[in-house]
Amino acid sequence: MLKKDDQVTIEIEDIGTDGAGIGKADGYTLFVKDAVIGDIIKAKVIKAKKTYGYARLMEIITPSKDRVEPVCPVARQCGGCQIQQMSYSAQLKYKQKLVRDNLARIGGITDCEVLPVIGMENPFNYRNKAQYPVGRNKDGKVVIGFYAGRTHSIVDYTKCAIGAPENAQILEKIRTFINENNISVYDEQSHKGLIRHILIRTGKHTGQIMVCLIINGKTLPHADKLVDCLKDISGMSSIMININKERTNVILGSECSVIWGNSYIEDSICGIMFRISPLSFFQVNPVQTEKLYSKALEYAELTGNETVWDLYCGIGTISLLMATKARKVYGVEIVPQAIEDAKNNALRNSLNNAEFFVGKAEEVVPRIYDEDMKKAENEPVDSKESSGLSDSASFESVMRINPDVVVVDPPRKGCDETLLDTIVKMNPKRIVYVSCDSATLARDLKYLAANGYEIARVQPVDQFAHTVHVESVCLLSKVQK
């Protein structure tokens, strides 16, 4: 068995879910960050367990055919991109295999089609949102950048290869503002200092820019000077502060205020305009989001007569896209501000067939289902024509408990089993599952497959080039007995 500080020469044979290369030395498995399948490397053991260990890449003896030089000079230090050293075509193959392997290993699903990953034409400068921690280094200089992998040590770098190109100019102007006005920056250990993070959001289609400083206080000194140095940047539409005085790793607090411009920016997805605030969830890769959501719409097979539930709806992105093709859409989201945004977005796009509910999907949907079941039992409705009730509450109750399509787009933890149970009771013809974590997708598909649904196909979409993350959209159809 190897021990800490041992050095070995190994060939990388596989890659793990976190992007680390996997190789073996005399049968002992080592995980090596920054290594690529096909590399022959020299590695130094940094942590040794009984049957496996972790090692640091010391030297590339023979590079893999899939190895490329990272575009970003700090790619190895920064925790943002895990696989930038892998060719983009190899990244897409890895992500397809990751989805397929998780479905098989966790869900026991081996007979459904996992399609090739839909990739990007240009896998750089795609992010429309970035959050940069601010601090000081050991010499007392202001640092702005990203956390090094598995640490809270800030890598001082502003020209992120996957971020919007204009971000670097904005960040350097803010650095100058901090220095010239002696503004304090946050220190995690002491919980002192003012500026914690800088959030930048950009509208891909509109060119609008939002800058929001997250502060450990109530006000930003010399805010007028910050406005002066940022307002003339092309596209600048919103300069805000967000208050977060908690001792926490959560970046944003709940309170925002405008110091210049609007409290939002606007952007579009598939021709639908959305207002985006600092707290809004909005997919970070708009080009790929259009491909992902278009595939979800295709899988929904809407003709204009359907009732649709959209669970974890955020600001209504999928809901409103479905509303352009469906009879009625119901959306559920836990964040009140997001639901307000969703309602306003529906009004702005003249879509009056979408209705939204605030709360946890696993609480709201079962409650509404139970309430509507009681209404339906008291006032049964057989069809749209019966008793002229097509617009009545009782008719809508029946439609809500028997939707044609249910769409889910949950966070990484996936769907609560209580929610999945209610979806099964609703008995929709189709379920469209949009997932940002193929492991929890596999778990939830296993449950649905055991309860009357057939997994038709899974389409991965690369939303996060150069990282190990991959989105997928899956179509499930009700098994006909």
Image: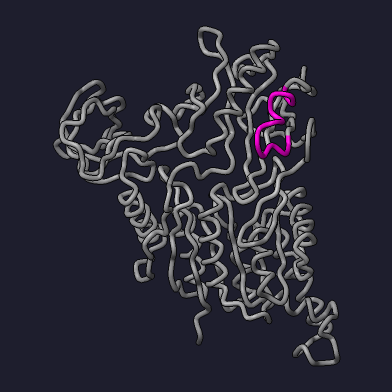
Would you say residue 31 is visible in this rendering?
A: no
Say which residue appears at 45% left-offset and 47% top-offset: 469
Say which residue appears at 31% left-offset and 27% top-offset: 47
135 vs 334, left or right, is left
Q: Is residue 289 above or below residue 253?
A: below
Q: Which residues are magenta?
A: 226-238
217 vs 125, left or right, is right
Report the quarter where the N terminus lies.
top left
Is 75 contained in the magenta span?
no
Spot occupied by residue 224 in the image (x, y as percentages of width and height): 78, 22
Q: Is residue 135 above or below residue 266?
A: above
Quarter of the figure with residue 68? top left
Q: Is residue 4 above or below residue 351?
A: above
Q: Is residue 281 above or below residue 114?
A: above
Say which residue appears at 65% left-offset and 58% top-offset: 317
Q: How many marks?
A: 0
The answer to which of 189 and 421 lies nearer the viewer is 189
Spot occupied by residue 318 in the image (x, y as percentages of width and height): 63, 62
Quarter of the figure with residue 420? bottom right
Quarter of the figure with residue 24? top left
Would you say residue 186 is visible in this rendering?
A: yes
- The residue furthest bottom is 386
13 vs 161, left or right, is left
Spot occupied by residue 75 in the image (x, y as percentages of width and height): 39, 31
Spot occupied by residue 313 in the image (x, y as percentages of width and height): 66, 58
